[in-house]
Amino acid sequence: MTPRQGSTVSGYSYQWSLFADWCAAADVEALPASPITLAQFLDENPAGDAVQLRRVSAINRTHLHAGQPAPGRVTSIRIALDSARSDRTIRHAKQYQVIAAGLPTSGSTAALFGRRDAVLLVLTGAGLSHRAIAGLDRTDITIDGDSVWIGGRHRVDIAPNDTTGVEPATIWDRWHTVLQFSERYPSTTLLAEHLQRNTFPDMAGLPQRRGPVAVPIDRWGHLPLPVTAMTAAEVGAVIARHRTGVSPLHTPRRPIIRPSDGTDRSDPIVPEPVSAELDSGYYRSGVEARRRAHTALADVPDMVDEVEDRIEQLLERTLQLLDSSDSGGST
């Protein structure tokens, strides 16, 4: 063994000992170590690129000698990064699709918000950012069977989920029908009437026109004219409200009742009010319980997202470090 080789081996031993000690203190496995563990180690022990690459080489070398996969291989980091993103997307897709499936689609002003918000939830679950959703155009979305294809620069396929039973094509078609109807008949009253009875005319043959997917709605169900897009912050606020279970109540419009004029049009059915004997503190207790639960749990989704964002950032930084090095064989 030459003096230089001996110095290299000694340096590897020191770097490995540093890593092993850090793992012991952090209560994580040093051998085998995951790419995420390696990324966290490099983040919490800052140094120049040359030193960090020597550390990665030492950790890889020890793993290979022990017959374990090297956590610092570029391929390993890429797989871990893709896996983290994929797992997160799958979990969010299921969570948001369950919420979307429970939103109203006809009968009241809330149904107008329900149709729009269901689309925003499905798009978010597919991995699109709030900024991407705010900038999405109707012409970017096409239906393929029960699936939805997001074209343009996104190129995302949203397929039906057997677990949730949600059909993305149906979710999109409901909101797209509202957008087309409002464009052709810009009347809030007429929109509310068709929404109440779910009797929209067939508009499948109409030409596809450009326009935002995420459109703001005021509390009375008015869409802006001309149509404008929601901001990324507004999209994020809608998603956050649904995720925490505190979506706002919407002011219902008065029932549309037409006088009998001998035509074939049927009047909307207005259900008879039902009274119930409730304790005087019933509503107050329910509101207080809901407020306590919201206060206790509101930060949980954000905390989980912050952890996942942090892991993704660490993996990205480690990948950039390795990609910037020409010594791919040594790591």
Image (cartoon, grey):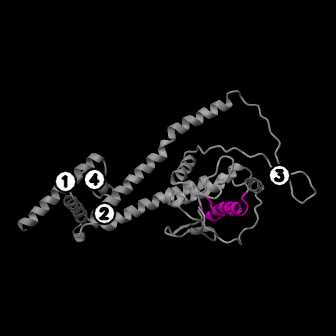
Disc 4 on helix, strand or loop? helix
Identified by mark 3, the residue type is Pro
Measured in 3D between alpha carbons, the distance from the residue under mark 1 to the one under mark 4, in whole angstroms, is 12 Å
Tell me: residue 214, above or below residue 276.
below
Q: Residue furthest right?
A: 262
Residue that mark 3 sits on: 268
Q: Is residue 40 left or right of residue 124?
A: left
Q: Which of marks 3 and 1 precedes in the sequence?
A: 1
Q: Which of marks 2 and 3 precedes in the sequence?
A: 3
Residue that mark 4 sits on: 41
Q: Which of marks 2 and 1 precedes in the sequence?
A: 1
Q: Which of marks 4 and 1 precedes in the sequence?
A: 1
Q: Which of marks 4 and 3 precedes in the sequence?
A: 4
Measured in 3D between alpha carbons, the distance from the residue under mark 3 to the one under mark 2, in whole angstroms, is 62 Å
Q: Which of marks 4 and 2 precedes in the sequence?
A: 4
Residue 190 placement: quadrant: bottom right
Q: Which mark is residue 320?
A: 2
Q: Residue furthest left?
A: 3
Residue 135 inside the magenta-drawn segment: no
Could you tell me which quadrant the N terminus lies in?
A: bottom left
Q: Nearer the viewer, mark 1 or mark 3?
A: 3
Disc 2 on helix, strand or loop? helix
